[in-house]
Image (spheres, rainbow, N blue to C red):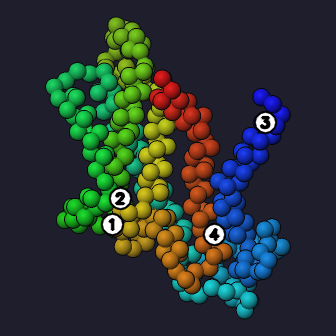
Amino acid sequence: MSRKKRIFLYVASAILALWLIGPILWIVDASFQLDNELFSVPPHWIPHNPTLDNYKFIITRVPPPAYDYDPGIIRMGHHASGEALAAIPALKNSLVVSTATMALNVAISVLAAYAFSRLKFVGRDASFFFIMMSRLIPTIAIAIPFFVIIDRLHLLDTYLALILVYLAFTLPFTIWFMTKYFDFMPPDLEDAAMVDGCTRFQCLTKVVIPVVAPGIAATAAFAFMASYSEFLFAVLLTKTMASKTVPVVLSAAAINLDASYALASTTVVLAIIPPILFALIFRKYITSGLSMAFGK
């Protein structure tokens, strides 16, 4: 490759990277400013007076002195404070629901996928086809039926309602993904283990699961991310902060004209930290799991 082409590729890659991460960098930058500096003209790309007051306010619920006494701070009314105080409870709700959905997804999808991949039983193909087809139904088309069912079960505004709905939408993909993963794995190890006296379930727990750990990590990542970022059912099935999740709180801040942009930016930063940490911790397993499933 010529030098000009390499330079062009580097420049194009830098522009694309800036285009993708630029908004995130601006959100992080805004979270360390107060509104009076954030709305200064020209804008401060690097904070002149960086502060942790926004984070302290959201975490401790105690307004910093600047918010109480500085008349230059704009958009710091009651609504902005209320939304800021809802960030931490909403983050807790999102983590509880997403973690539970992820754990159930892994447990159910591994067992179901292993059965579809290794066992022959009546109705196997029909059952697998039905599970896959259920994922093709548009979400909005069944939102009202789901609401009615959850309401009749008296589960509105609970974690369980969100977990059950998220399971219904994530399990088809995770079962399909793990089934394909098991299909790529030769059954020789299982045959050898059963010759040595292991049962089918012991083969799964002691032989197969350690081998398919990257696929399980990729499955867990998908279930967690899908549940953590879901909005439609989160806003439809929740009423109070007992179960409202982060996307619902962020949407409320986005449509509130009195909201503090600095506090809203801080809430966004806090909301994206868990998925980033999850991806960083399990990135090796996720990458190898996806490569093996889709690379063959």
Which residue type carries mark 3?
Arg
The residue under label 2 is: 162
- Element on which disc 2 rests: helix
Image location of residue 148, percent across then percent down: 21, 65
Spatial CA span between label 1 and label 4: 26 Å
Q: Nearer the viewer, mark 1 or mark 3?
A: 3
Spatial CA span between label 3 and label 2: 49 Å
Spatial CA span between label 4 and label 2: 26 Å
Image location of residue 257, percent across then percent down: 55, 83
- Element on which disc 3 rests: helix
Residue contact between numbered discs 1 and 3, judged by CB atoms under 8 Å = no
The residue nearer to you, when weighing 1 against 24, is 1
Spatial CA span between label 4 and label 3: 37 Å
The residue under label 1 is: 237
Structural crowding at the residue carrying mark 4, measured as other residues with C-alpha within 10 Å and reported as few (<14), some (14–19) or many (≥20): many
Structural crowding at the residue carrying mark 2, measured as other residues with C-alpha within 10 Å and reported as few (<14), some (14–19) or many (≥20): many
The residue under label 3 is: 6
The residue under label 4 is: 265
Which residue type carries mark 1?
Leu
